[in-house]
Amino acid sequence: MSDSPSIFTKIIAREIPADIVFESDAVIAFRDIAPQAPVHLLVVPKTEEFANVTELAAGNPALLAELVSVAQSLADEYAGGQYRLIFNTGENAGQTVFHVHAHVLGGNLEEGTLG
Ligand code: 5GP
């Protein structure tokens, strides 16, 4: 965990605005600010103690399961249940925010869209 709050922690705290589509005690979901598909949601645990999905899987598998379940529900609601679920893991894989999050991409994806 870094010293300063992640951009997602600031969204959770309502310090910066976001288009929030779901929130529970443990998980929040909002629209990506730079969508790469017709539906592009980010599903984020409220705790920022896990930098990536590997740490989350090792440290709190139940929370990872909840994240995937929320992603499925949102994909059902916003993308007809067909979607890509992406966890960029590490800088070389394109990860820019080191507060674990799942990208949910849906809605007539073009070939090659990676999120
Ligand atoms: P990563 O590259 O770490 O897998 O994904 C980070 C995602 O967060 C990017 O798709 C980026 O567009 C999104 N993002 C970065 N800053 C903000 C923000 O302030 N608000 C929202 N809604 N999304 C953001």
Image (cartoon, rainbow, N blue to C red):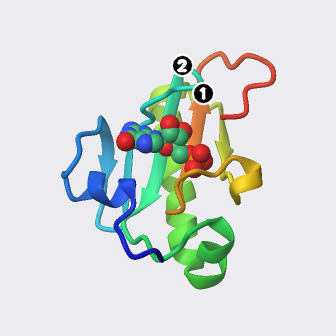
SS type, badge 2: loop
Q: Tag 1: Cα neighbours inside 10 Å, few (<14), some, or many (≥20)?
A: many
Question: Does the Cβ of the disc 2 residue fall within 8 Å of ligand 1?
Answer: no
Q: Is residue 34 left or right of residue 92?
A: left
In the image, what residue occupies the spot 36% across and 65% down?
A: 46
Q: Earlier in the sequence, mark 1 or mark 2?
A: 2
Q: Position of residue 27 (x, y in %)?
A: 38, 60
Give the amino acid type for the residue marked by disc 2 in the picture: Pro
Q: How many marks?
A: 2
As drawn, 115 above or below 60: above
Q: Quadrant of residue 79?
A: top right
SS type, badge 1: strand
In the image, what residue occupies the spot 63% across and 76% down?
A: 55
**Any part of residue 72 in sight:** no
Query: Which label is found at residue 38?
Result: 2
Q: Quadrant of residue 13?
A: bottom left
Give the amino acid type for the residue marked by disc 1 in the picture: Gly
Q: Tag 2: Cα neighbours inside 10 Å, few (<14), some, or many (≥20)?
A: some
Extreme residue toward the left, this view:
14
Q: Look at mark 1 in the image and give the residue it sits on.
A: 106
Q: Position of residue 14 (x, y in %)?
A: 19, 51
Q: Position of residue 105 (x, y in %)?
A: 60, 32
Q: Is residue 70 left or right of residue 4?
A: right
Q: Is residue 15 left or right of residue 85?
A: left
Q: Position of residue 49 (x, y in %)?
A: 46, 77
Question: Does the Cβ of the disc 1 residue fall within 8 Å of ligand 1?
Answer: no
Extreme residue toward the bottom, this view:
59
Judging depth in this view, the residue of 60 and 51 nearest the camera is 51
